[in-house]
Amino acid sequence: MFLNIIIRIFLGAAICGAFLFAQPAHAMDAKEFYELARNYPGINAFAATVQSAVETGHWKSYLWVNAYNGAGIKAPASWRSSGRPYIRVSSPERVGGKDTMRESYFRFYSSPEEFLEDYRLKIVQDYPRSAASADNMWGYFAGLYHGRLGSWATDHKYFEKLAKKAMQLEAVLLPPGHLKKAFEYAKKYKLLEQWQVKIIEAVIK
């Protein structure tokens, strides 16, 4: 019992030390993130850049600046109990007509590289359809709705946000017309559901 307490104190101190000595993350831009993401097999670098831009407000969010968490990846009990670093975030929420504060736990990373490696593992392990469509960003986005443990986001508006952001970033990161060609490919090989096709058609036109 005493040994367990000592171990917990040690782990807690180690995690606190990581926060104390970690430097606040700088706000990357899309080109920086995209070039870095291209080094990680199993993901679509452009799609990962789009998703991270949406999740972090172009790498300026609290989670990115304080924890290099570029996709809002939660820290479940198994992550926390293993002594791996995490960050607590409290946010207001209305439950039963009353205002309350909800506390959530998110994974803490020491660098963009560490985040991307863990993100890559999550995609490969939990979102096999996205990993299988690593060469097509539309199929990759569609795969986020067919995770091993559920969808990344159940709201259709999340897909719409990804589609709109993809169109914005195409001009910065990809040759003109690339997304239209990728869309035709995704339709041909039935990588998309009909509601996703309609969203992309509305965004591309």
Image: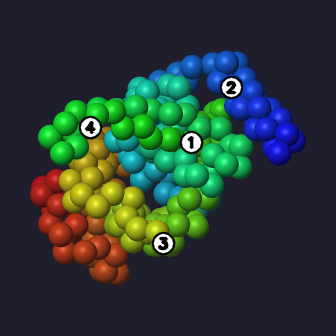
Residue furthest toward the front? 1
Identity of the amino acid at label 1? Arg
Q: Alpha-carbon distance for marks 1 and 3?
A: 19 Å
Would you name the residue on which mark 2 appears?
16
Badge nearest the viewer, 2 or 3 = 2
Note whether residue 111 is visible.
yes
Residue indicated by mark 1: 107
Please tell me the numbered disc located at residue 93. Answer: 4
- Specify the label residue 148 is tagged with: 3
The mark lying in front, picked from 3 and 4, is: 4
Q: At 80% across and 32% down in the image, what residue appears?
A: 10
Mark positioned earlier in the residue sequence (1 or 4): 4
**Rendered position, 197 above or below 36:** below
Q: What is the quadrant of residue 92 in the picture? A: top left
81 relative to 191, above or below: above
Q: Residues within 10 Å of mark 4 (few under 14, many from 20)?
A: few
Instruction: Say which element carries label 4.
Output: strand
Dot 1, crowdedness within 10 Å: few (<14), some or many (≥20)?
many
Instruction: Determine whether label 2 and label 4 are within 8 Å by CB.
Output: no
Residue in the picture at 38% in, 46% down = 50
Real-space CA distance between mark 2 and mark 4, rounded to the nearest whole angstrom = 27 Å
Disc 2 from disc 1: Cα separation: 14 Å
Could you tell which of marks 3 and 4 lies nearer the N-terminus?
4
